[in-house]
Amino acid sequence: MKQNKKIDAMFVLSLVVPVFNEADAVGLFVDKVIEVFAAEPNVGIEFVFVNDGSNDNTLDVLLALQQRCQNLKIVDLSRNFGKEAALTAGLDSATGNVVVPIDVDLQDPPELILEMINKWREGYEVVLGRRINRDTDSLLKRVSANWFYRIHNIMANPKLPKNVGDFRLMDRSIVDAIKKLPESRRFMKGLFTWVGFRTTYVDYVRPNRAAGTTKFNGWKLWNFALEGITSFSTAPLRIWAYLGFTVSLVSFVFAVFIALKVLMHGVDVPGYASLMVAVTFLGGLQLIGIGVIGEYLGRVYIESKRRPTYLVRRVFEPEDKNGP
Ligand code: UDP
Ligand code: MG
């Protein structure tokens, strides 16, 4: 790791940490952050924990931590809204000059933030944490992630940078820009990229989870990928027009061919197999087309209800610890 410059002027760094059943991990996380920033008196740390409807004792552990931490805020959501909504809630209540969304399981190493801060000082407004390998992921996750980025980036604009998660440093101006985006279904990686600004990277090796277990199974990731693509591309909708055009063209050529054949050789009854193939193939294509329209229509429907992205049960402000 590079030698870090000393950071001179005082500023506040908000760590936005979504947590879902992470009672074992939060303590380790806070200790690690405090240790990393012990030698940086000019960085004021603001912890913004978003309790995403945990059903273990995460909230109690957080409240206990609040007693011994300087500046620790807990946004307690009314139920599990998912990581994207939890991140949104965190960004909404973070007040720092720079904001870093970070996983609580120490897979996003807090030491890296020092390097990110150096880049920010050089004038970059976004500093992405980029994983230089995916050895800590299963083979299935690696292959599927690779395909997701490929397909997403063919269809969607702007392109998602590869091997970059939510772990990044953002200047206040970016957080404000993201807060202004009105959609209630939020694919954060896409939104972060969409806003643009001057961007750079710092590379890191992603370690294994420090405690607890992953909250994402295959089905959740599949739906997450669909959300990403449908939120940032309409190519899957438009592709059907081109496909329909191609199939019609081929059918037309085929029809001419059959007509000529009948003219030259007379009527030829057999053709059942080819007929069935054409009917079932086209039936399948039409169902896929309707399914894709359904995906989008469903999203339009949900978005049109204008429900809030998340609901807060209670915010535990740092100063609450002195209150009643
Ligand atoms: N998380 C959340 N809500 C959810 C699922 C996950 O807030 O519904 C949080 C989780 O507590 C963790 C972060 O999102 O801080 C990343 O989750 P995880 O480590 O399970 O994901 P992975 O690293 O396995 O992709
Ligand atoms: Mg993790």
Image (spheres, helix red, strand yellow):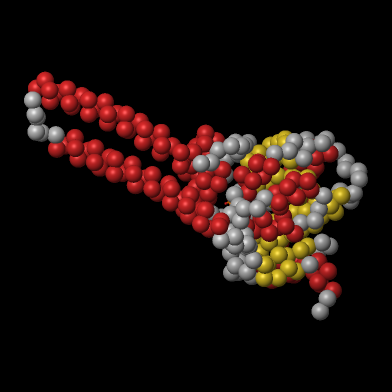
Residue at the far right in the pictured view: 9
Q: For the point 8% across and 25% down, which residue is it?
A: 266
Tell me if residue 91 comes above or below residue 126 in the rendering: below
The front one of 56 and 82 is 82
Tell me if residue 174 comes above or below residue 62 in the rendering: above
Residue at the far top in the pictured view: 264
Tell me the quarter of the image containing the N terminus: top right
Q: Residue 287: where, in percent of width, then height?
A: 34, 47
Residue at the far bottom in the pictured view: 324
Q: Is residue 108 visible?
A: no
Q: Is residue 249 left or right of residue 256?
A: right
Tell me the quarter of the image containing the C terminus: bottom right
Q: Residue 298: where, in percent of width, then height?
A: 48, 55
Q: For the point 79% across and 67% down, which residue is it?
A: 317
Q: For the point 17% across and 22% down, which residue is it?
A: 260
Q: Is residue 184 visible?
A: yes
Tell me if residue 193 comes above or below residue 180 in the rendering: above
The front one of 320 and 312 is 312
Q: Residue 81: where, in percent of width, then height?
A: 59, 61
The front one of 161 and 280 is 280
Q: Is residue 164 left or right of residue 233?
A: right
Q: For the point 55% across and 57% down, which residue is it?
A: 304
Counting labels gives: 0
